[in-house]
């Protein structure tokens, strides 16, 4: 085997791992469509709602009652999230909320749900 072939194999393996780590499911994460998400928020009083978008995005509107903990800060602020509550996450499109769920799951959170399609799919009220 020459160096070029080994290098190409390593690059391909890295790319496969990277794509898998970004898109693989999170064990126990509930993927909720907007109507389900809204129903669960209304029905579950033992919950915390977290907007994982950056502060500049939140200024455009957020779901009432949401706590803003950006994905970029969630590892350092995990202690602000009660482990004894159901955690509902959302972002702009649903990708960052899945990443946040993965981080929270690794930190012992079990009751996790996210808004599929993110706030772009949300039909409910927004606060600015």
Image: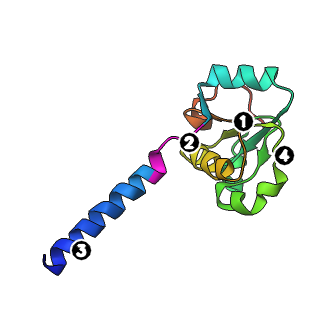
x then y, percent, for residue 60 = 69, 44
Residue of label 1 = 111
Q: Are marks 3 and 4 in contact (CB under 8 Å)?
A: no
First in residue order: circle 2 vs circle 4? 2
Residue 75 position, x and y percent, is 70, 60
SS at circle 3? helix
What label sits on residue 26 in the rendered view? 2
Residue under pointer 4: 82
Name the residue carrying label 3.
7
Which quadrant would residue 64 be assigned to in this image?
top right
What is the x, y in percent for residue 28? 61, 35
Q: Gap in Å between the C-alphas at discs 4 and 1?
A: 11 Å
Classify 125 as above or below 23: above
- Residue at 29 percent across and 68 percent down: it is 10
The verdict on residue 22 being magenta is: yes
Rendering colour mode: rainbow
Within-10-Å neighbours for mark 4: few <14, some 14–19, many 20+: few
Q: Which of marks 3 and 4 is nearer the N terminus?
A: 3
Asked if the residues shown at circle 1 and circle 3 are in contact, with their CB atoms under 8 angstroms apart, the answer is no
| Real-space Cα separation, disc 2 to disc 4, in angstroms | 19 Å
Please say whether residue 128 is visible from this viewpoint: no
Percent across and percent down for residue 27 are 57, 39
Is residue 62 shown in magenta? no
Q: Which residue ends up furthest to the left in the rendered image?
A: 1
Q: Earlier in the sequence, mark 4 or mark 1?
A: 4
Chain-order first, disc 2 or disc 3: 3
Q: Give the range drawn in magenta.
A: 21-27
* Circle 3 Cα neighbour tier, 10 Å, few/some/many (<14 / 14–19 / ≥20): few
Name the secondary structure under disc 1. loop
Tag 4 secondary structure: loop
How much space separates mark 2 and mark 1, taking CA atoms?
12 Å
């Amino acid at each position: 085997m020459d160096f070029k072939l080994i290098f190409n194999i390593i690059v391909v393996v890295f790319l496969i791992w990277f794509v898998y780590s970004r898109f693989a499911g999170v064990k126990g994460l509930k993927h909720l469509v907007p109507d389900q998400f809204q129903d669960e928020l209304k029905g579950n009083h033992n919950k915390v709602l977290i907007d994982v978008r950056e502060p500049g995005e939140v200024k455009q509107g957020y779901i009432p009652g949401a706590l803003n903990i950006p994905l970029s800060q969630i590892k350092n602020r995990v202690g602000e999230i009660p482990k004894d509550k159901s955690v509902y996450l959302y972002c702009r499109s649903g990708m960052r909320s899945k990443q946040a769920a993965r981080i929270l799951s690794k930190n012992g959170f079990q009751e996790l749900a996210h808004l599929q399609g993110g706030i772009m799919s949300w039909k409910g009220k927004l606060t600015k």
